[in-house]
Amino acid sequence: MASVLNCKASKVPFVYLGLPIGANINHKKNWKPILEKFDSVLSKWKAKVLSFGGRFTLVKSVLGSLGVYYFSLFKAPTGILKKLESKRRRFLWGGNEDNERISWVAWQKIIRDKDRGGLGVRSLKVINLALLAKWWSRYKNELATCKSLLAGLEMKDKPDLWLWKDVEGSEVEYRVKNLRWEMDNMKYQKVEDNFLLKCIPIKVNCFVWRLLLDRVATKEALLVRGINVGDNKCVICEAAPESALHLMVRCKVARWIWAIILEWVKLPGFNFSKSVREIIDYPAKFKMNKMECELIQAIVLVKCWEIWLTRNDMLFNKKMFSMVKVINDIKVMSFLWVCNRNKRLGIDWEKWGRFQFS
Ligand SMILES: [Zn+2]
């Protein structure tokens, strides 16, 4: 037959448009191309040169969509999903197949949506199921189009859609993202005070998110995990054990920095002592317009980030502490990030320096 048609004879399984045709997709070996694709994206050097924010973006956007082609047609075996999630997790924390590094936050927490306290990375299992369910939606909805082609068939005025009930009980059209969102979130409570801000980089948001969970590599946190770091004293003041709470809230240097920043943004001083959350929530206690509140919250987040950078510079590069430099870095970096991302605000450096916008 092949010779009559002048074609080459072949047999199953074969690869067509990148997909294995005629192969038993329940066999792990048929998922090898996906595992290899993940490995090529998660190369060692990328994990080394990227910041946590960069790795997060890659894990979320690239790795999340790499398997979509396969996932929209085949149900991935549990073992494969576990392997792929493990590759994503290791990469996010800067490790690889041979070298696992500390996972400071549980993967189950990271894949939660942002309004459930996570980073919204999304689980591959849920992406897979939501994509497969899309076929049901297409079958139901496109059946109507087929029927319309048949003459003499009585049709109702109402569009024939595959509807399903969402959590609030109302009927909505099927969307992959809706089902994925509901499967992801059915287990977790909504978190009201989501501080993640679009006007500052992901790396700063991720850092503060970890700070609030007390999952930052301070000396105390490393000691708890059995890692020898020598003494446990705060790198900046050398007067107390270095925990996230000390470094950001209780350290005398952090208090001085807070006092200067609060004076700059024209908020009354406050003796913070309880938690990092207390500092983040502070600007929202005052009556001001939404824009101004968000600007101050952004500055608070940048301030936490700059304290961490200063501490690392002192510890690893043996730099001396300079209050002038820290304050300057907070003002400059917050200006560059916030104002470049919101050009319509029309804030210039002079207005920023006075923190007066009207
Ligand atoms: Zn200190």
Image: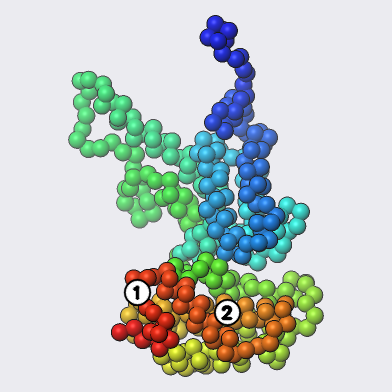
What residue is shown at x 28% (from left), y 26% (from top)?
Answer: 147
Q: Nearer the viewer, mark 2 or mark 1?
A: 1
Residue 112 % position (x, y): 52, 59
Callout 1 amino acid: Leu
SS at mark 1 in the image: helix
Q: Kindly indicate the quadrant of the structure image that contains residue 75.
A: top right
Q: Kindly indicate the quadrant of the structure image that contains residue 156.
A: top left
Q: CA distance from mark 2 to mark 1?
A: 24 Å
What residue is shown at x 59% (from left), y 40% (from top)?
Answer: 76
- Quadrant where the C terminus is found in the figure: bottom left
SS at mark 2 in the image: helix
Q: Horizontal placement of 298 versus 343: left or right?
A: right
Q: Is residue 309 visible?
A: yes
Give the labeled residue for mark 2. Answer: 306
Residue 130 % position (x, y): 47, 44
Callout 2 amino acid: Glu
Q: Pick whichever, 303 or 333, lies toward us.
A: 333
Mark 2 surroundings: few (<14), some (14-19) or many (≥20) residues within 10 A: some
Q: Is residue 192 visible?
A: no
Residue 345 is marked as 1
Residue 146 % position (x, y): 31, 26
- Quadrant where the N terminus is found in the figure: top right
Q: Mark 2 vs mark 1: which is more N-terminal?
A: 2
